[in-house]
Amino acid sequence: MSFEPIPHTGDMAVVVKAASRDELFSEAVRAMFAMTQPRQDVAERSVERSFNILSLEENSLLVDLMNQALAEAEINHEAYQKVIFDELKTASARGRFIGLTVAGFETPIKAVTHHNLIIRSDGDQWTARITFDV
Amino acid sequence: MSVDWRKKFHQVSLFLYEARPSDISDMRVPAKVYADEEIFTAACLDQSLNQLVNVAMLPGIVGQAIAMPDIHEGYGFPIGGVAATAWPRGAISPGGVGYDINCGVRLLLSDFHFKEIKSKIERLADELMRAIPSGAGRGGRVVLTSSQIDEVLIGGAEWCVKNGLGEKSDLENLEENGRLDGAQPSEVSETAKRRGKNQLGTLGSGNHFLEVQCVEEIFDETASRAFGLFPDQVAVAIHCGSRGLGHQVCTDFVRQMLSKQDEYGYHLPDPELACAPADSPEGRSYLAAMAAAANFAWANRQVIVHHVRGEWLRLFGAESFLGTLYDVCHNMAKIETHEISGVAKRLLVHRKGATRAFAPGRLEIPAIYRSVGQPVFIPGTMGTSSYVLRGTEKAMTETFGTVCHGAGRRLSRHAAKRQVEGDELRKRLEEQGIVVRARSSAGLVEEAPEAYKDVDAVVRVVEAAGLASRVARLRPVAVIKGD
């Protein structure tokens, strides 16, 4: 598994690992929705939602990307398993969230926070630690 | 690098610990924690004291940064955190309010003794579970148009009453009468409105709940008479907030203010403390959006009250009564007047997981309660007691008229799931005589009593420190988590 929940007193946190920055950001979104425990929609169908985000810097970009995914998911009753980037720079990203319609979430997430946020790369592997307000 | 907080915080009295600016650089004011030894020891183990020290660095902070005994790690502010900044130029920090703007508790009182309706509690719980959505699956029963959502953002609980979703008498007994002035729907993003438009009248998830309770013990006869409480009385508590709309407002403004830190010369140690001067364009926009989200939360609780009354009337008849005792907020920033060194000052008081608890005589308190002090509700967790208290003069002097908001978590959700088994928990609660209605056992387990501090201990600290005085203790008889 590319992600692992870690303890946080009030809410939820996760460590995500991937081989590249694109993959890390995509896996972070996938991990987030896995942790919301989506309920299957009886009329389940595939969905795509586009995004175009301009942020301050890399950490903020990950938070902004994930919060946009959260908002779209809540509004449209969807959960995303993948992110396809048409462009991913240090502080901007453009692409699509790919996922499925859902009936709801067992553990809805209020927001992705900057709390304890770390993104690092040691050459072979990218790692992110992210905390969610539940 | 871990810090030994016992070396930084001095115990100044039995239930008060303090770190001083002379001990930690960049602190502008002292940081104070109301706690007993056990609570303080636990606070040393997560980041909550570090967060409190960071709060003491906020630009324009006045007096002290404070944490209540339900303290635990949050974002920016610790949960249970309180800070006042000078109005209008001191900082406003969305992190000092929280993502769930105006999360709070409404307490309704019936005219029943528990023994009169005990035989109908299971049916009541079934009907409330059916009638009150959590919003995690289906949306609320009131879906707002674009123009209506703006009306709700301005009108709050008052909008509900005007639209047949409440009683005028409800408004008299809500903090701020259920509506904060200064709300501007134009400062709330379209994304926030889209998140909120079908969430009115929904509980939310996590630690949000609807609980039928019974008054178990009266501590203060005078105050309980003023509040309308009597032994064995049936009450209904509703704990929820501004749902996705409020969450998005906080997300939007943390993002916006982060981009302005350099411009205002702010160098705070935590991005979740991002702030702006309250009278700056960003500060004014946030306060207007926060007020709008707060009004949405009051409307949310009011619609739930309306649905609860509908089921109550159906089950117990048109002669039955379910009135509002009071409604408290525990995530909010408000402009208030407090005395600092004997001088009345206008301050912007941030309460993040902390409840206003004003003393007798304050004009903000409804006239019927003014002689005894503001009602304060401290909900427990499933299976544990909740408390009604009243505010005191000491709280006005020491904590900007503030006390705790609940028991405060001590275990992560992950740890709770490892330690507690869902079916066993449900059975344990039922053996205590508590009817449980929840869609999933996983959600129950995360909110197990073991996951929280001892609410009796938290309330004991608050009372022993003189910040509030117990009026009554209530026990749960039914817990409903919403469908």
Image (spheres, helix red, strand yellow):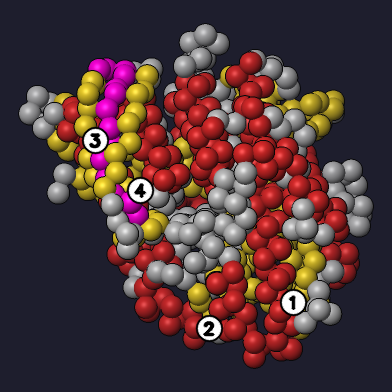
Q: Is B24 rendered above or below residue B69?
A: above
- Say whether mark 4 and mark 3 are on the same chain: yes
Q: Quadrant of residue A18 in the image?
A: top left
Question: Which of the numbered marks, if any, corresponds to residue B432?
Answer: 2
Which residues lie in the magenta part? A89-102
The spot of residue B412 in percent (x, y) is 38, 54
Cα gap from disc 2 to disc 3, whole angstroms: 48 Å
Residue visible at 22% across and 40% down? A82
Amino acid, disc 3: Val
Q: Quadrant of residue B311 in the image?
A: bottom right
Question: Which of the numbered marks, if any, corresponds to residue B313?
Answer: 1
- Say whether mark 3 and mark 2 are on the same chain: no
Question: Which of the numbered marks, if any, corresponds to residue A78?
Answer: 4
The spot of residue B195 in percent (x, y) is 51, 43
Cα gap from disc 1 to disc 2, whole angstroms: 27 Å
- Say whether mark 1 and mark 3 are on the same chain: no
Q: Which residue is mark 3?
A: A83
Cα gap from disc 4 to disc 1, whole angstroms: 37 Å
- Determine whether label 2 and label 3 are within 8 Å by CB: no
Chain assignment, label 4: A
